[in-house]
Amino acid sequence: MQVKICGLTTSEQVKTCIEYGANFCGFILNYKKSHRYISYQAAEQLIKINKKKTSYVGVLVNPTTEELNTFSNLNLDYFQIYGDYSSKEIVQLKNKISKKIIMALQIKGKQDVLKYKIYEKVADIILFDSSGLHKSLSWDYNWIKPVPSSVLRMIAGNINMDMLESVKGIADIVDVSGALETNKVKDIFKIKKFLDKIKKINDQN
């Protein structure tokens, strides 16, 4: 099971994630409603940190063409995109920006999971997320069990350490943010503890 730590805002947070083996570091680039939002200049500085084996992800909510063009200048590995796009539009976007795509689906009900079929052949990863965006809401992760193993499945939405054992057979990647914060700020101790737990679970398998 891989892990993405999202909503990072400081170099200490990023370096800790890399040192403790996070597979993905996520940065909120254009969603100013989130307390995890960072400016272009801040993102530019953070992604200069040697990522080693970690991938850098830029999170974009309903991005404009101008925003996509601007943020494509950042040395990111993935764009994580929220919005209503056709598979053709995602292909065109990938060709234009030369980034891998995490397509985020907001899950309110079981039927929402089926939207993965639109993107399974064009997105590199499908993220099944809650409908809360910057609010961590829970949903039934078991809904994604019928999704074929050919789809790289990431889940988000109120993920915490206590549920890792139960989701390890469901998701390929867990995406966590709020559970690693204290007073809306990423907690270095919580990051280390979470990533250590992931490592222990993976070592058991």
Image (cartoon, rainbow, N blue to C red):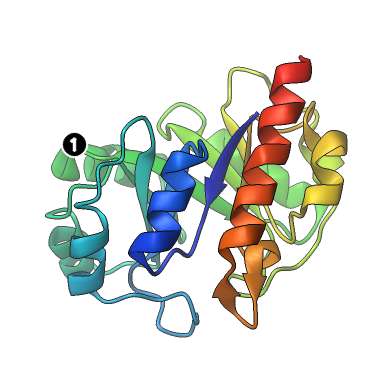
Residue 54 percent across, percent down from the top left: 39, 36
Q: Residue at the spot x=75%, y=67% of the render?
A: 137
Residue 77 percent across, percent down from the top left: 29, 40
Element assignment for label 1: helix
Q: Residue at the spot x=18%, y=36% of the render?
A: 95
Which quarter of the rendering shows the N terminus? top right
Which quarter of the rendering shows the C terminus? top right
Residue 30 as seen in the image, left or right of residue 191: left
Task: Classify 202 as above or below 181.
Answer: above
Residue 133 percent across, percent down from the top left: 59, 70
- Residue 174 visible, this orientation: yes
- Residue 155 visible, this orientation: no
The amino acid type of the residue labelled 1 equals Asn
Q: Which residue is outermost to the front?
A: 189
Q: Which of these two is toward me, 142 or 188?
A: 188
Residue 43 as seen in the image, left or right of residue 107: left
Q: Quadrant of residue 44?
A: bottom left
Residue position for label 1: 95
Task: Classify 165 as above or below 89.
Answer: above
Residue 111 as seen in the image, left or right of residue 121: right
Q: Which of these two is toward me, 115 or 167?
A: 167
Residue 148 percent across, percent down from the top left: 68, 21
Task: Classify 116 as above or below 152.
Answer: below
